[in-house]
Image: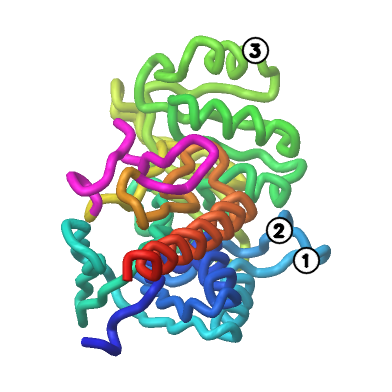
Amino acid sequence: MADNHHKVVIIGSGPAGWTAAIYAGRANLSPLVLQGTQPGGQLTITTEVENFPGFPEGIMGPELMEKFQAQAERFGTRVVYDTVNEVDFSKRPFRISTDESCYTADTLIIATGASAKWIGLESEQRLMGHGVSSCATCDGAFFRGKEVIVVGGGDTAMEEANFLTRFCSKVVVIHRRDSLRASKIMQDRGMNNPKIQFIWDTIVEDIEGSKETGVTSVTLKNLKTSEISKFPTQGVFVAIGHKPNTEIFQGKLDLHPNGYLKVTPGRVNTNIEGVFACGDVIDHHYRQAITAAGTGCMAAMDAEKYLEAQEANLATSV
């Protein structure tokens, strides 16, 4: 079991988790990264990333995460492909149980991220990164001059639709109801944008296209008339929200009503001393690789300071 004790354990391996590992490794803390069910996080289902600094020609999402991991391992990070299913903060060191083993940690950095909510179509998953996206900020520039659809009716959908009009010739919002759920100000922005059109009482039943051609059309169903129709489009942006990956922390850490982890404003410490959180699991607003990486840096630096304080207290009490 001694082999399974670490000063710093990081749960999650997206930009936040790897950045935390790089900083913790450089501080000689020999961190452990438990990669989880989606190693590399959401960037592994992204094709080209053009907005991460340092890559002027762009870089593929999976390749960027491989570089993050290689940098973390260079500084002594131990990486285990395993999924955490339970945490125990009731005593110290903290206990982290996975599918394969059990670990203890003096500090814990949570970088479990958030997952986009999807419609649930096979074609949606098959064409992800080839015309299907859940992030206009990440992928909108690839659709310059094209006609796309946005699925959803809340603030997220209106934000995505308005952002896409910077690049796209037309944006059509597909919504299953006859009115938007978005806030009044966001509704007004969408309704008053000449590039945005609306199709009401309608769902997307299928997405046509291939990895070679990209998206070519969608199959729509009107929920009031049951009419099925084909609608030509060159991109599908699913904007029905994100779900933070915080299930295992419910009842153990303070959460916002929307499920995101609560941290001290401007900081990354949770309500339990020695437990830090970073990346999309605390951020429902920006959700960018660069902002996630920034908070990963903050978490590692705070973990280092916490450990130094603990060691100093131990030394004075002896």
Q: Secondary structure at mark 3?
A: loop
Q: Amino acid at mark 3?
A: Asn
Alpha carbon distance from label 3 to label 2: 32 Å
Q: Residue at x 28, y 40 (%)?
A: 254
Residues packed near mark 1 inside 10 Å, few (<14), some (14 to 19) or many (20 plus): few
Query: To which quarter of the image does residue 105 belong?
Result: bottom left
Q: Is residue 45 in view?
A: no
Q: Is residue 163 above or below residue 31?
A: above
Q: Is residue 275 in view?
A: yes
Name the front one of labels 3 and 2: 2
Cβ–Cβ under 8 Å for marks 1 and 2: yes
Q: Amino acid at mark 1?
A: Phe
Mark closest to the chain's N terminus, 3 or 1? 1
Q: Secondary structure at mark 1?
A: loop
Q: Name the residue that disc number 1 marks.
A: 55
74 relative to 102 in the view: left or right: right
Q: Quadrant of the C terminus?
A: bottom left
Task: Tell me if residue 264 is in the magenta stretch.
Answer: yes
Q: Residue at x 41, y 68 (%)?
A: 311
Residue 214: % across, % down: 60, 58
Q: Residue at x 36, y 58 (%)?
A: 122
Alpha carbon distance from label 3 to label 1: 36 Å
The label shown at residue 52 is 2
Residue 124: % across, % down: 43, 54
Q: Amino acid at mark 2?
A: Phe
Q: Name the residue that disc number 3 marks.
A: 192
Residues packed near mark 2 inside 10 Å, few (<14), some (14 to 19) or many (20 plus): some
Q: Which residues are magenta?
A: 249-270
Q: Secondary structure at mark 2?
A: loop
Alpha carbon distance from label 1 to label 2: 6 Å
Q: Residue at x 48, y 25 (%)?
A: 155
